Amino acid sequence: MSATAPPDPPPDPPSDAKGELRALTEASRRAFSETADPAAYVERAASAATLREIEAWLDEAEGATSVGALVATPGLGKTMLLRVVEARLNRRSLAADTPAARPDALYLPYAGLAPTDLALWVYGLLGRARPRIESEREAVEALLALGDPKGAPFTLLLDDADSMPPETIAALTAGLAPESGSLRWLVAVNPDSKGSRLRAALHALAPREFAYRERLDLAETGAYLRTRMRWAGFPDALLERVDEDEIQRIFALSNGLPRAIHAIAADRFDAMAAVGGTEALGEKRRREDWMGRPIDFDLEG
């Protein structure tokens, strides 16, 4: 039996085409990376409404709870919302452009640290002098000292907050006042059993909850994809090739989740660059079973 010879590789594109393909690859990585850059935030009705609720809570003075919980479907963009809140708070606080101006908010990608390590990490990220901490109580006091009791409180935004260890939860519930003072926490959790346990553990602080679970519809998927592509610098000719049929296919596979939209779009544009041109979009479309089961990152239940 004779072995089947492998197909010949595609010919190298000319040098000017290589530059275009390199630009396409870079634009795809920029548009569809997992990094949540607030400059790339694409507003829609559900995200705008959630941000308004969060900002109204942060603007409250006396009587506002010190802890908020963003409960969001996995893959929907809770990290992006946290980064947008951070950017808006710091844009406002640094607008004075004086030597005394300093950030009023800090995003943390995870919360799985003991109280002392958490406090030291925060101070290090802010570039502030390392505090002397010899107990969990002093760790919480160091965090409380980040804000100005007579001015705007400091806001910590904790992603994947259900990774917080029991000793940190206990230290926070013991050291924080239920009503806002110099420090506020906005924690992001999934609507699953782990997130429910954390919210129950923080019950003494009466956390304000903000639900963000509405997936993108077909029109929002198209607007999201094209806006990200424009922001990343995709050429107009390629934007025109992403037609309504293409949007329908991406919507069907992604189930309206931005994380899945990123994965699908990145795969398609990477394949396009690999074979050397935009004609790969149609070729890949013909090869794939587009009506398969949508990608679903939802962990509810």
Image (cartoon, rainbow, N blue to C red):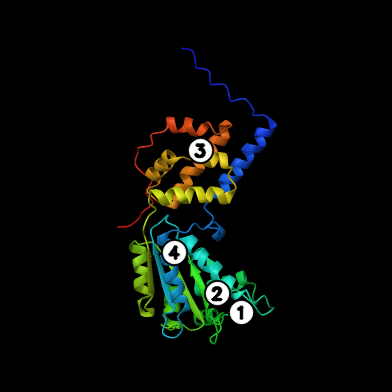
As shown in the figure, which amino acid type bears the numbered disc 1?
Answer: Pro
Residue bearing the label numbered 4: 48
Residues under numbered marks 2 and 3 in contact, where contact means CB atoms less than 8 Å apart: no
Q: Dot 1, crowdedness within 10 Å: few (<14), some or many (≥20)?
A: some
* Residue 44 horizontal/vertical position (percent): 44, 58
Along the polypeptide, which appears first: circle 3 or circle 4?
A: 4
Residue at 35% across, 76% down: 203
On screen, 293 above or below 79? Answer: above
Q: Dot 4, crowdedness within 10 Å: few (<14), some or many (≥20)?
A: few
Residue bearing the label numbered 2: 119
Residues under numbered marks 3 and 4 in contact, where contact means CB atoms less than 8 Å apart: no
* Residue 200 horizontal/vertical position (percent): 34, 72
What is the quadrant of residue 170 in the picture? bottom left
What is the quadrant of residue 161 in the picture? bottom left
Q: Quadrant of the C terminus?
A: bottom left
- Horizontal side, residue 72 vs residue 156: left or right: left
Of 203 and 105, nearer the camera is 105
Residue at 51% across, 51% down: 227
On screen, 270 above or below 111? Answer: above
On screen, 269 above or below 231? Answer: above
Residues under numbered marks 4 and 1 in contact, where contact means CB atoms less than 8 Å apart: no
Residue bearing the label numbered 1: 131
As shown in the figure, which amino acid type bears the numbered disc 2?
Answer: Ala
Q: Secondary structure at mark 2?
A: helix
- State how far apart marks 1 and 3 are (Cα): 56 Å
